[in-house]
């Protein structure tokens, strides 16, 4: 099973500020056919690791929230609408794009869902005494949970619950003659008592409901330790992280201008001759935004000190300087491999080729670096808002001669003292 995102794993989805965009994945099986998994979830967090929200698309009976925000427009295709209003249920949390922000989407998929361990307990005291017990969490650990009804065989006992690890014991109530007085509904009631610590502990691992056709009004009796069965972990879980960046229209305009500088050749590549599966080689929007961020870091490294961001950079007068530093960041990434555009020699006999782009790129980078060494400090001088001036006060030659001739202990201008 494979999870595919719309961009590469080292890239990022780009979302315009104050907009809505579906962030999606496509799921395929081992032979490449699109499939709908039985379990799908997404967790959205910020870059500090704080969870913003979680959403589950797993079967309709257990969706959370219901209805889910995850969309399923076609087989194997799932999308989350990242935008202005997502009907959020958690107070104080949001994933709105009204301000610039970076997100991390973590998708988790199972082809075959996990199942819940369960069992039906029949004390044999009537059709209305049957109860269904099931594990709170899906998976094989539920198969270790057991339930036991215990007749204390003592008069005037109260109904109680005891949890010992994965073992649940129900101590039945009796009257003054020692006869059990607990009905099935009483067990459901005590397990739902939030003020009973023992019941709360038991409810953390097991749920109890009336069996089909049972109204819970029959008395129950002792039942030997009975294990829940049928819990399974399903198929192995696949997960994938997807970066999402919210950018402003200004930054978006820079990506188009940077593309004109750095992406000289755009090739349309066909897959098996099918134009519907073709793609264009070249830089994605996410990659160009990374280069622009690299350009900002190059500018910020120069003196005089001063830090620019996407929000405070002086675009109106120095936009091209940022494009050139972004170009430098991008060209540096091309130093290792440029087979697509730079193969001066090729031999189809020996299946060999020669790449010699590195020297040309190095020469260009040296020229660009020399140019930026002059331009960036001059630009930053226009935005210096504070500084310091160090003044060293000392006597001139005439005052020095006067101090030398003065008697010991003389004080001049409250600054110089003849020892």
Image (cartoon, rainbow, N blue to C red):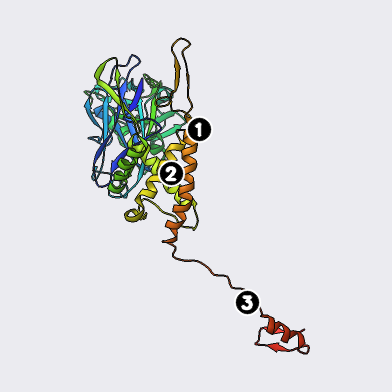
Q: Residues within 10 Å of mark 1 (few under 14, many from 20)?
A: few
Secondary structure beneath disc 1?
Answer: helix
Residue closest to the eye, 97 or 155:
97
Alpha-carbon distance for marks 3 and 2?
A: 44 Å
The picture places residue 394, in percent across and down from the top left corner, at 65, 77
Which of discs 3 and 2 lies nearer the camera? The answer is 3
Residue at figure coordinates x 26%, y 26% from the top left: 77
| Residue where numbered disc 3 is placed | 393
Estimate the spatial distance between the alpha carbons at disc 2 and disc 1, rounded to whole Å.
Answer: 22 Å
Disc number for residue 359: 1
Secondary structure at badge 3 equals loop
| Label annotation for residue 294 | 2
Quarter where residue 78 is shown: top left
Left or right side of 70 for 194: right
The mark nearer the N terminus, 2 or 1, is 2
**Does residue 150 appear to the left or right of 131 in the view shown?**
right
x then y, percent, for residue 108: 36, 29
Q: At numbered mark 2, what does the secondary structure look like: helix, strand or loop?
A: helix
Closer to viewer: mark 3 or mark 1: 1
Q: Residue at the spot x=44%, y=23% of the render?
A: 344
Which numbered disc, 3 or 1, marks the residue that appears first in the sequence? 1
- Residue 18 visible to the viewer: yes
For residue 190, which quarter of the picture?
Answer: top left
Q: Earlier in the sequence, mark 3 or mark 2?
A: 2
Could you say which quadrant of the image residue 192 lies in?
Answer: top left
User: Mark 2 Cα within 10 Å, few/some/many (few <14, many 20+)?
Assistant: some
256 to 182, vertically: above or below: below
Q: Residue furthest top?
A: 349
User: Mark 2 and mark 3 in contact (Cβ < 8 Å)?
Assistant: no
Foreground residue among 143 and 240 = 240
Q: CA distance from mark 3 to mark 1?
A: 53 Å
């Amino acid at each position: 099973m494979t999870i595919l995102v719309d961009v590469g794993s080292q890239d990022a989805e780009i979302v315009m500020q104050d907009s809505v965009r579906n962030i999606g994945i496509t799921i395929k099986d081992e032979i490449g056919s699109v499939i709908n998994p039985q379990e799908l979830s997404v967790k959205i967090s910020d870059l500090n690791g704080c969870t913003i929200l979680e959403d589950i698309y797993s079967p309709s009976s257990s969706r959370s929230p219901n209805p889910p925000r995850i969309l399923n427009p076609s087989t194997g295709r799932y999308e989350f609408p990242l935008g202005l209003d997502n009907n959020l249920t958690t107070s104080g949390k949001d994933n709105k794009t009204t301000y610039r922000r970076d997100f991390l989407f973590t998708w988790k998929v199972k082809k075959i869902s996990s199942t819940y361990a369960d069992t039906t307990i029949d004390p044999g005291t009537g059709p209305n005494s049957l109860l269904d017990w099931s594990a709170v969490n899906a998976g094989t650990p539920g198969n270790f949970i057991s339930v036991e009804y215990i007749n204390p065989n003592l008069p005037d006992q109260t109904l109680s619950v005891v949890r010992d690890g994965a073992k649940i014991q129900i101590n039945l109530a009796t009257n003054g003659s020692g006869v059990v007085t607990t009905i099935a509904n009483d067990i459901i009631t005590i397990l739902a008592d939030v003020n009973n610590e023992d019941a709360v502990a038991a409810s953390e691992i097991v749920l109890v409901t009336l069996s089909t056709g049972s109204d819970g009004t029959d008395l129950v009796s002792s039942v030997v330790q009975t294990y829940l069965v049928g819990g399974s972990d399903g198929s192995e879980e696949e997960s994938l992280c997807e970066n999402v960046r919210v950018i402003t229209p200004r930054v978006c305009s820079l990506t188009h201008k940077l593309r004109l500088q750095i992406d000289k050749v755009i090739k349309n590549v066909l897959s098996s001759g099918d134009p519907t599966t073709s793609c264009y080689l070249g830089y994605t929007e996410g990659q160009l935004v990374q280069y622009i961020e690299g350009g900002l870091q190059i500018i910020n490294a120069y003196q005089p000190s001063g830090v620019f961001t996407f929000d405070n950079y002086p675009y109106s007068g120095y936009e091209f300087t940022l494009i050139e530093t972004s170009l430098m960041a991008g060209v540096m990434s091309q130093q290792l491999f440029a087979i697509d555009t730079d193969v001066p020699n090729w031999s189809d006999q020996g299946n060999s080729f020669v790449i010699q782009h590195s020297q040309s790129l190095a020469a260009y980078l040296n020229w660009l670096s020399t140019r930026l060494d002059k331009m960036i400090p001059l630009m930053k001088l226009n935005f210096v808002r504070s500084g310091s001036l160090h003044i060293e006060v000392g006597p001139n030659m005439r005052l020095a001669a006067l101090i030398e001739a003065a008697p010991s202990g003389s004080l001049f201008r409250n600054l110089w003292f003849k020892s």
